[in-house]
Image: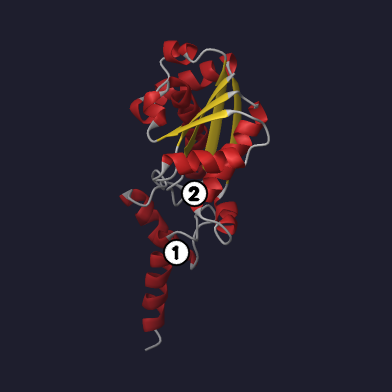
Amino acid sequence: MICGVDEAGKGAVFGPLVVAAVCCDDPRECARLGAKDSKKISPSRREVLFTEISIRFKTAIVCIDAPSIDRYLQVMTMNECVVRAHAAVITQLCPAIVYVDACDVNAARYGARLRALLDHDCTIIAEHKADHTYPVVGAASIIAKVVRDREVAALRQRYGALGSGYPADPVTRTFLVRYINEHGRPPPFARTSWQTVSDCLSSYSQTHFSDFK
């Protein structure tokens, strides 16, 4: 069995990190479906492929919410958090060969760290932009992206327009500033360990402290 692994939401300030693995006998099946880097597929097409991939192949998903990420980052780096989540989905499927999008500037080092976390023997191929190179990793990226997008959509329904959840998104930053100004704290789905949140909290504190001068 051959497995592809990828994640969505690593750099987001809002919402979960979602890691997915897709396992198949022949990776050409993923190519025939049109699986590729999820960023190069429209949202509607991703939904269609999500259903087809889920029906045809074995999949595994790990979803880590914002509060859990904050707790993990007290004792490990974000890359360590991701590699452990990658190991968790691989362990669920026990493939013989794994293709993974490396979350480290040193792809070989990332592959070695991932291999050390696994209890079963398998070949690890860790590369940058593996979701672009290998359709089976592209399939995993689609699963992860759709699951995260659904989680963020549920947050929008409850809290209103909060954008994509990434720090570079002006809608996300505007929502964060407004929420902190109104409530005096970040929203419960924000990663408080992120510098973006710290900066907004610092600005809020300085503004309100000046009221006492």
Q: Is residue 67 above or below residue 108?
A: below
Front in this rendered view, residue 4 or 98: 98
69 on left or right of 108: right
Residue 167 on image: x %, y %: 37, 52
Checking the image for residue 180, the label placed there is 1
Q: Nearer the viewer, mark 2 or mark 1?
A: 2
Q: Secondary structure beneath disc 2?
A: helix
Where does label 2 land, which residue? Answer: 79
Q: Is residue 186 above or below residue 116?
A: below
Please state the total of marks drawn on the protein image: 2
Question: What residue appears at the point 40 percent right and 43 percent down from the top-left corner?
Answer: 164
The quadrant holding residue 63 is top right
Residue 192 on image: x %, y %: 50, 60
Q: Is residue 154 visible?
A: no
The quadrant holding residue 107 is top left
Q: Is residue 24 visible?
A: yes
Q: Is residue 157 above or below residue 185?
A: above
Question: What residue appears at the point 51 percent right and 55 percent down from the top-left corner?
Answer: 77
Mark 1 packing: few (<14 Cα in 10 Å), some, or many (20+)?
Answer: some
Quadrant for the N terminus, please: top right
Mark 1 belongs to which amino acid? Ile
Residue 121 on image: x %, y %: 64, 30
Q: Secondary structure beneath disc 1?
A: helix
Q: Is residue 61 above or below residue 116?
A: above
Quadrant for the C terminus, please: bottom left
Question: What residue appears at the point 58 percent right and 17 percent down from the top-left corner?
Answer: 57
Mark 2 → mark 1, Cα distance in angstroms: 28 Å
Mark 2 belongs to which amino acid? Asn
Question: What residue appears at the point 50 percent right and 56 percent down from the top-left corner?
Answer: 191
Front in this rendered view, residue 40 or 26: 26
Checking the image for residue 3, the label placed there is none
Mark 2 packing: few (<14 Cα in 10 Å), some, or many (20+)?
Answer: some
